[in-house]
C-alpha cells in the first residue's frame, strides 16, 4: 500500500510532536506522523514518580551499548521512549535549557542563543514564578514548580548555599551558576509530555494522520530526492514535499544509514548500497555520564514510601503527595575549576536512593546526590552491524572527563557533609561503598557510572560541507530530507535535552514553512 502526504515525520518524540502540530496548523497541507511505539496510555506515564516503572517495558526501546573499556568493560542500559511523546513520556521532567555559551558555541548561523531563545519561550507556559521574564507564558508546554517537594530538597539547597553556591531566582536564565529547585514539565501535578502539549490538541485536525505501531524501515530516495518512507510492514508513505526524521540520536542516524546515507565504505560492508557518502552520519555521539553519592537517611521522610496506597490516593484524587515528585527535585550547576567557561558539573538531588536506573530499590530510606558530566570531551558513534544498530558512547576516552567527574563527586561529598544535611545523613548506602579519595572516586565511577539519558550529536548540524545537515536541517546531498531532533546538536548542552529537543522542533517548523529561513 502507498499513501501520499505532503510531509512524513518519523518519530513522535519531543521534536516530532512539535512538528506534527506546527505543520498541520496549515489546513492546506497533509501530515503523517509515524511512531514505532504505541499510545501513551499507561497510568505510570501520568504519574511523575512512576517513570522507572516504564523502563524495560514495551514503552521503552531498551537499548544496550557496546562494552565500555573505561567503565570496566560494562555494557550500559540506555532507555529511550517508544510511545507517543517519546522520551518526554518517561523522563524525569526536568526543564533545563542550558546556557548562552552552549548555543553560541555551536557557531552555526541562525542558532546562537539569541536566535533560539524565542523558540524556547514560544514553547513555554510558565506556571508560577517567572523572575526576570525568563520563561514564555503562553506556549503549550506547562513548566511548573513541584507541588509537594520533599523536605530534604530544601535542606539540599541550603547545603549548596553553605558550600558557596548561589541560590538562583530562576534556573533557565542565560547563565546558571548556582542551585535551584527543579522546574518540571508538569500540569496540576501530572506529567505534561510533548504529546500532551502538542499532539493531542492537533489530532482533531483532518489533515494530520498519526500512525502508531508502525516502524520506519528506510527513507526512499530517487534521483537524489527523498520521496517517502518504507515501513517494516511493507507500506509506503509517500511525501510530496519532505521527509523529516525526528527519531532521536539513535534512530535518525540509523535510518539514514539504512537508507544509504552515511559512510560509503561502512554501508557497503553491511550490505547497503550507498546513495550519498556522508561519513559523519552516526559520529559525534555525546552523552551526559552520571555518577553519584548515595547515603542513608536517618528519618523516614524520603520517597522510599512513595508507592503506598495512601500516596496513590493523594495523587489520583488531589494531584499532590510523593508521587508528584520527579525524583530529581533540585539541581546545582558548578565549575570544577576557575578555568571552566561555564558550569561543567551538575548536581541533581533525589530524596531517595537512586541506583540502577531505579530498577532495584535498596531497602530503607536514603538520598542521592547525582553528579553529571555536562560537557564531555569523549566522542562516540552510532554504527551498523548488518541492519542492526550499534551504540558505542566511548565513555571516558578523553582523560579530562574522569578528572571532572571525580572533582564533581568531591563537591557532592561537600554537600553531604554540610551542617544543613548532616543530621539527616546516614552511612553509605548500597551500591555506594563510601568512596572518598580521588583514587577511590575514580574507581567508583568506573564501577557504576551510568547514562543520564541524553545522547545527542549524531547528525551534526553545521555550515561546513562535512556536516550531516546544514543550518536549515537539510541532509546534505539529498533533497526533500531533513533531520529535526537532538541528533543535530554539534555540542551537547549544559542542561537536559528535552528542552532543546522541543526548541529544535519549533525552529524546524519555521525553517520548513519559510517563517524562519536562514539565508546562505
Image (cartoon, rainbow, N blue to C red):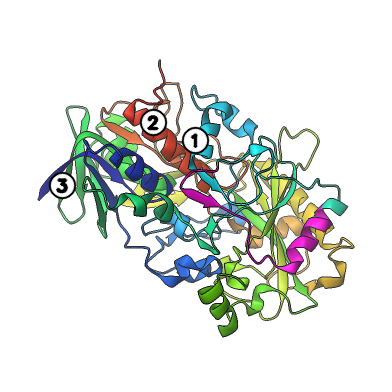
Residue shown at 59% from the left, 41% from the top: 135
Magenta part of the chain: 137-160
Q: Does the magenta stretch include residue 144?
A: yes
Q: Is residue 62 left or right of residue 306?
A: left
Residue wearing tag 3: 236
First in residue order: circle 2 vs circle 1: 1
Location of residue 76 with respect to 243 vertically, above or below: below
Residue wearing tag 1: 119
Q: Does the magenta stretch include residue 120?
A: no
Q: Residue 510 carries which label?
A: 2
Q: Is residue 173 left or right of residue 433?
A: left
Task: Say which element carries label 1.
Answer: helix
Work out how far the residue at label 2 is from the one at label 3, CA to CA, in angstroms: 27 Å
Q: In which quarter of the image is residue 113?
A: top right
In the orientation shown, which residue stands out farthest toward the top? Answer: 520
Work out how far the residue at label 2 is from the one at label 1, CA to CA, in angstroms: 10 Å
Residue shown at 81% from the left, 62% from the top: 416
Amino acid at each position: 500500500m502507498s499513501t501520499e502526504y505532503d510531509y512524513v515525520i518519523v518519530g513522535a518524540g519531543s521534536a516530532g510532536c512539535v512538528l506534527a502540530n506546527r505543520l498541520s496548523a496549515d489546513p492546506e497541507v497533509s501530515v503523517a506522523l509515524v511512531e514505532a511505539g504505541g499510545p501513551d496510555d499507561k497510568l505510570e506515564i501520568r504519574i511523575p514518580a512512576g517513570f522507572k516503572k516504564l523502563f524495560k517495558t514495551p514503552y521503552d526501546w531498551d537499548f544496550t551499548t557496546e562494552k565500555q573499556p573505561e567503565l570496566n568493560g560494562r555494557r550500559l542500559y540506555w532507555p529511550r521512549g517508544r510511545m507517543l511523546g517519546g522520551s518526554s513520556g518517561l523522563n524525569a521532567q526536568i526543564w533545563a535549557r542550558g546556557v548562552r555559551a552552549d548555543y553560541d558555541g555551536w557557531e552555526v548561523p541562525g542558532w546562537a542563543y539569541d536566535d533560539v531563545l524565542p523558540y524556547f519561550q514560544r514553547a513555554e507556559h510558565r506556571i508560577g514564578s517567572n523572575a526576570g521574564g525568563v520563561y514564555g507564558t503562553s506556549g503549550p508546554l506547562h513548566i511548573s514548580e513541584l507541588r509537594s517537594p520533599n523536605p530534604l530538597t530544601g535542606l539540599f539547597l541550603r547545603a549548596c548555599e553553605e558550600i558557596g553556591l548561589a541560590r538562583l531566582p530562576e534556573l533557565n536564565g542565560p547563565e546558571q551558576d548556582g542551585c535551584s529547585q527543579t522546574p518540571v514539565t508538569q500540569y496540576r501535578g501530572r506529567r505534561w509530555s510533548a504529546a500532551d502539549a502538542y499532539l493531542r490538541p492537533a489530532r482533531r485536525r483532518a489533515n494530520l494522520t498519526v500512525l502508531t505501531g508502525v516502524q520506519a524501515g528506510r527513507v526512499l530516495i530517487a534521483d537524489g530526492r527523498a520521496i517517502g518512507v518504507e515501513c517494516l510492514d511493507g507500506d509506503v508513505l509517500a511525501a510530496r514535499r519532505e521527509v523529516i526524521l525526528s527519531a532521536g540520536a539513535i534512530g535518525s542516524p540509523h535510518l539514514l544509514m539504512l537508507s544509504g546515507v552515511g559512510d560509503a565504505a561502512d554501508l557497503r560492508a553491511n550490505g547497503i548500497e550507498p546513495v550519498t557518502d556522508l561519513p559523519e552520519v552516526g559520529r559525534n555521539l555525546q552523552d551526559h555520564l552520571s555518577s553519584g553519592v548515595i547515603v542513608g537517611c536517618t528519618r523516614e521522610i524520603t520517597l522510599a514510601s512513595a508507592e503506598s496506597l495512601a500516596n496513590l490516593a493523594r495523587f489520583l484524587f488531589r494531584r499532590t503527595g510523593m508521587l508528584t515528585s520527579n525524583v530529581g527535585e533540585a539541581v546545582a550547576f558548578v565549575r570544577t575549576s576557575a578555568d571552566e567557561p561555564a558550569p561543567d558539573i551538575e548536581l541533581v538531588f533525589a530524596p531517595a536512593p537512586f541506583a540502577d536506573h531505579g530498577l532495584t530499590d535498596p531497602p530503607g530510606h536514603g538520598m542521592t546526590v547525582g553528579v553529571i558530566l555536562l560537557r564531555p570531551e569523549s566522542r562516540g558513534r552510532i554504527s551498523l552491524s548488518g541492519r542492526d544498530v550499534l551504540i558505542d558512547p566511548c565513555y571516558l576516552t578523553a582523560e579530562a572527563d574522569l578528572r571532572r567527574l571525580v572533582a564533581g563527586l568531591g563537591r557532592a561529598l561537600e554537600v553531604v557533609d554540610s551542617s544543613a544535611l548532616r543530621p539527616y545523613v546516614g552511612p553509605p548506602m548500597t551500591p555506594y561503598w563510601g568512596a572518598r579519595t580521588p583514587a577511590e572516586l575514580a574507581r567508583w565511577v568506573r564501577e557504576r557510572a551510568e547514562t543520564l539519558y541524553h545522547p545527542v550529536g549524531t547528525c551534526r548540524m553545521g555550515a561546513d560541507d562535512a556536516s550531516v545537515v546544514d543550518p536549515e536541517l537539510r541532509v546534505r546531498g539529498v533533497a526533500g530530507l531533513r533531520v529535526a531532533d537532538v541528533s543535530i546538536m554539534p555540542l551537547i548542552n549544559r542542561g537536559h535535552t528535552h528542552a532543546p529537543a522541543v526548541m529544535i522542533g519549533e525552529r524546524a517548523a519555521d525553517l520548513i514553512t519559510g517563517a524562519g529561513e536562514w539565508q546562505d
